[in-house]
Image (spheres, rainbow, N blue to C red):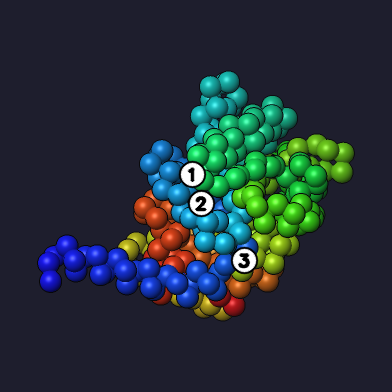
Amino acid sequence: MTQNMNEMIERAKTLVEALPYISAFSGKTIVIKYGGNAMNDENTVRTIMQDVAALKIVGVKPILVHGGGPEINSMLSRVHIEPQFSGGLRVTDEKTMEIVQMVLAGKINKNVVSLLNTLGVKAVGLCGKDAGLIKVKKYSPNGTDIGYVGEIVSINEKLLEALTGDYIPVISSIGADEAGVSYNVNADTAAGAIGGAVGAEKLIFLTDIDGIRSKENDPTTLISRISVGEIEDMIESGAIKGGMIPKVRGCIDAIRHGIKSVQIVNGTIPHSILLELFTDSGVGTMVTA
Ligand code: ARG
């Protein structure tokens, strides 16, 4: 057989491997959290959105939740707003919140929506203020006032359920309190709460790391599957530390919200979503109860 024909057969095998997953996930809701460094590069964003559109086309109901990443900071410095801190925590004052909302809901959200809409699907941009999608109250860690940072009180899952049949909701992680005031919400937390509220099958955290490693600095020690209990042991023993802790806590919280699996995937690997969902081995770390 020619080289070319062998390659063609390999490709057919990839499709065959994907089929049971396509039928298992079709009709199910999958929440994808996207943000940070995975949204820096135009080509990366494009391949991510191609994957999201592909999910929709095979019958999955994707919901995209995004944060701000570096764009908020660059806009703040363009308008000469200095970052403020209180007790080591970043403070979101009124002016900062205004910029956060402009960048998240005005710029990033609309860019993602228009890109998806060129890829053969219909995306709708929302933020937590739309129809009470994300209701929050002020979050004050240990009584410290850090400004307009919100803690999630409720999610309007009915709005999302009404949309996901035909559309892909793209959600900026901003919430509103009872009085309609805007608050910044951690996008990982928002994705977990939204996934829980809609009874999502899966939550995918797109980041710029491959997943959880048993040795932090050794990329060859990527853990393919892990349980919540095993993660807790690794936090206890110090194997998971630093910046990784909030990420894995986000995974644990999402599982506690009732989501069956949370998958940490490197969004900078082209088509990592399709590789994770539609192959047996996946490319990231799969967290289950
Ligand atoms: N494609 C399957 C799923 O999404 C298996 C993924 C396995 N992933 C992993 N990191 N071990 O359910």
- How many C-alpha atoms fall within 10 Å of the one at disc 2: few (<14), some, or many (≥20)? many
Distance in Å between CA atoms under marks 2 and 1: 6 Å
User: Is residue 181 positioned above or below 65 on the image?
Assistant: above
Residue annotated with mark 2: 53
In the rendered image, residue 173, in percent from the top left (x then y), is placed at 66, 45
**SS label for mark 1:** loop
Q: Is residue 96 visible?
A: no
Amino acid type at mark 1:
Leu
| Identity of the residue furthest to the top in this view | 79
Residue, x 56% and y 69% (percent of image)?
A: 25
State which quadrant residue 278 falls in: bottom left
Q: Is residue 95 visible?
A: yes
In the rendered image, residue 287, in percent from the top left (x then y), is placed at 52, 72
User: Is residue 187 positioned above or below 236 on the image?
Assistant: above
User: Reading the chain from its start, which is encountered first: label 1 or label 3?
Assistant: 3
Residue annotated with mark 1: 119
Amino acid type at mark 3:
Gly
Amino acid type at mark 2:
Ala
Horizontal side of residue 186 vs 69, given as left or right: right
* Quarter the N terminus occupies: bottom left
In the rendered image, residue 248, in percent from the top left (x then y), is placed at 54, 64
**SS label for mark 2:** helix
In the rendered image, residue 229, in percent from the top left (x then y), is placed at 56, 79
